[in-house]
Image (cartoon, rainbow, N blue to C red):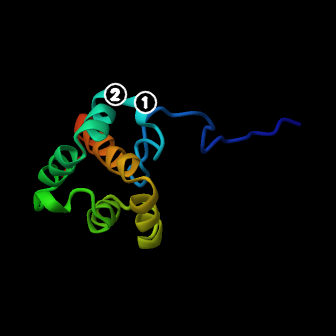
Amino acid sequence: MTSHHVVTAQPGFSSVPQAGHWQSGLLDCCSDFGVCICGAFCFPCLGCQVASDMNECCLCGPSVAMRTLYRTRYNIPGSILGDSLAIMFCPMCSLCQLKRDINRRREMGIFW
C-alpha cells in the first residue's frame, strides 16, 4: 500500500530577514563599517541621521523613546526595559543597530 504525504511547509534557511525582527544583532557592528565608524567617532551625527530618517527631532536619535518607537512601528519583539538596558549599557551599539536596520529596510523597500 502506498501512502501519500503532502508537504505543506518546506524547512530551510532564508537570507531574507523577517519583518518583525531586527535586521542585525546588537553587536553586529562589523557588518557595516561605515555606520560603525560614524557611531564611534561622531555619535551625535549618527543620532541626528537616525532621527532625520524617522522624521523626528535631532536630539531624539539615541533615546529609549526612539528605539521603542522604531520597534513598535516594525513589530519587533522587545520591551521598554530591554530598550533602556541597550541604550544604557551599549549606546553606540544600540544606535548603530538602529541605523543598520533603517538602511537594510530601505534597501528592501519596507522602510516608511
Q: Is residue 40 above or below residue 60?
A: above
Residue for badge 2: 33
Up-down relation of residue 40 to residue 66 (above or below): above
In the picture, residue 84 is in which quadrant?
bottom left
Q: Quick check: can you spot residue 105?
A: yes
Residue 70, horizontal then vertical, whole percent: 29, 60
Q: Position of residue 39 (x, y in %)?
A: 29, 40
In the rendered image, which residue does mark 1 sit on? 30
Give the amino acid at mark 1. Answer: Cys
Residue 7 x/y as whole percent: 65, 41
Instruction: State the residue in front, 6 or 38.
Output: 38
Question: Is residue 108 something one can see in this rendering?
Answer: no
Left or right: 40 with respect to 16?
left
Residue found at x 35% / y 30%: 32
Pointers 2 and 1 in contact (C-beta within 8 Å): yes
Q: What's the CA distance linking mark 2 and mark 1?
A: 6 Å
Amino acid beneath label 2: Phe
What residue appears at the point 28 percent right and 66 percent down from the top-left corner? 69
* Quadrant of the rendered image containing residue 97: top left
Name the spot of residue 3 as percent of width and height, x first.
81, 39
Crowding around mark 1 (Cα neighbors within 10 Å: few <14, some 14 to 19, many 20+) is few
State which quadrant residue 102 falls in: top left
Q: Which mark is residue 76?
A: none
Nearer to me, 70 or 46 = 46
Q: Quadrant of the N terminus?
A: top right
